[in-house]
Image (cartoon, coloured by chain):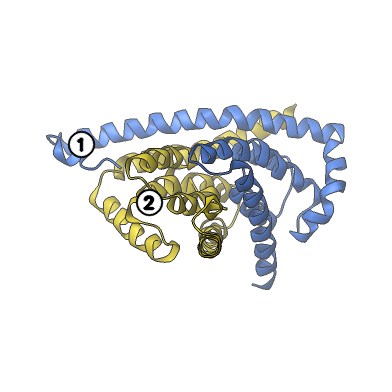
Chain colours: A blue, B yellow
Amino acid sequence: MPKDIDSSAAPPGLRARLRRDIVLGLKAGVGTFWQLSRFMIPAYGIALVLEELGVIDVLARAAAPVMSVLGLPGEAAVPLVVGYVLNIYAAVGAMEALSLSSTQITVLAVAMLIGHNLIVEGAVLYRAGMNGLAFGVLRALVGLAAAAVANLLMGVF
Amino acid sequence: MREFLSGSFSLLFRVFVIVVPIMVFLELFEGTRPFRAIVRGWSRLIGRWLGMDAETAAPTLVGFLFGLAYGGAVIVRDTRRHKLGRRQVFLMSVFLSMVHAIVEDSLIFISLGAGAFWVVVYRTGWAALVTVILGAVGTAAVRRWGPGGTAGH
């Protein structure tokens, strides 16, 4: 990390610096917000359409045994899979289409936060000299295990 | 269609309310002394628990805070610059692949009602645990079969 960017330069007024930082932050924030929206809103729409078409019901039945270990309804498999393939924002969009309790949201969040965006992030890891595919499998499995344990622990406390 | 429009709007609103303040906050505190002190403390912490070098600690913090793509870019650069060993890159990759963009990604789920402890502390705990386990597996593999390509897997 580059050090001393601010401290070595002639210090502009505190007020000016604050204003500059806030403007930079607002720009970065709005930019990120736009990037997120581009993935989230289409995914949210797709999830709603899949629900209308009954596709979620079919997937739900197939994945129900796994999801029930996590204390989740079968259709929670959809945001999970969307997250694995696309990214966390798309997954959040898909999750919004379901009605879940706050415990279920937490369990699903743990699984999705550990394993998501496996294709793009696998490529990043591959660039660093790692096996991107193996890391994808690792993250999906660890995410499910952590979510299952979280579900058990939250039932106790 | 009405469901889509109202749902989209509330989703966007919540994300906007979360993301923009974070970015302003980071911009304000990135270069400050406390922030750098945190980097030093972090380096000691993960060096001790996860077996990472001081050189590995900085890119790991970048990835932990800002995201795998940013952290990954720093990993690739430092791998060349500091000649980070394969074991160091492996440890860093295992840890970062499971927790990165800790503030942003966590807050998105917290804003939707997920428990903060679970998505931040509990999740980081799992990542650290898996890193320690796979690090030990790597050490055992090296001891048994020598420092071949298997060390990282």
Q: Crowdedness of circle 1 by 10 Å Cα count: few (<14), some, many (20+)? A: few
The residue at 46%/54% (across/down) is B87
Is residue B29 positioned above or below B117 on the image? above
> In this image, A97 relative to A7: left or right?
right
Q: Name the residue under label 1.
A: A15
Amino acid found under the numbered disc labelled 2: Thr
Same-subunit check for callouts 1 and 2: no
Q: Crowdedness of circle 2 by 10 Å Cα count: few (<14), some, many (20+)? A: many
Is residue B104 positioned above or below A68 on the image? above
* Nearer to the camera, B51 or B98: B51
Report helix, strand or loop for mark 1.
helix
* Nearer to the camera, A100 or A106: A106
Question: Is residue B21 in view?
Answer: no
* Nearer to the camera, B81 or A40: B81
Residue found at the very far left of the displayed protein: A10
The x and y percentages for residue B73 are: 42, 37
Q: Mark 2 — on which chain does it sit?
A: B
Is residue B67 positioned above or below B133 on the image? above
The x and y percentages for residue B150 are: 56, 53
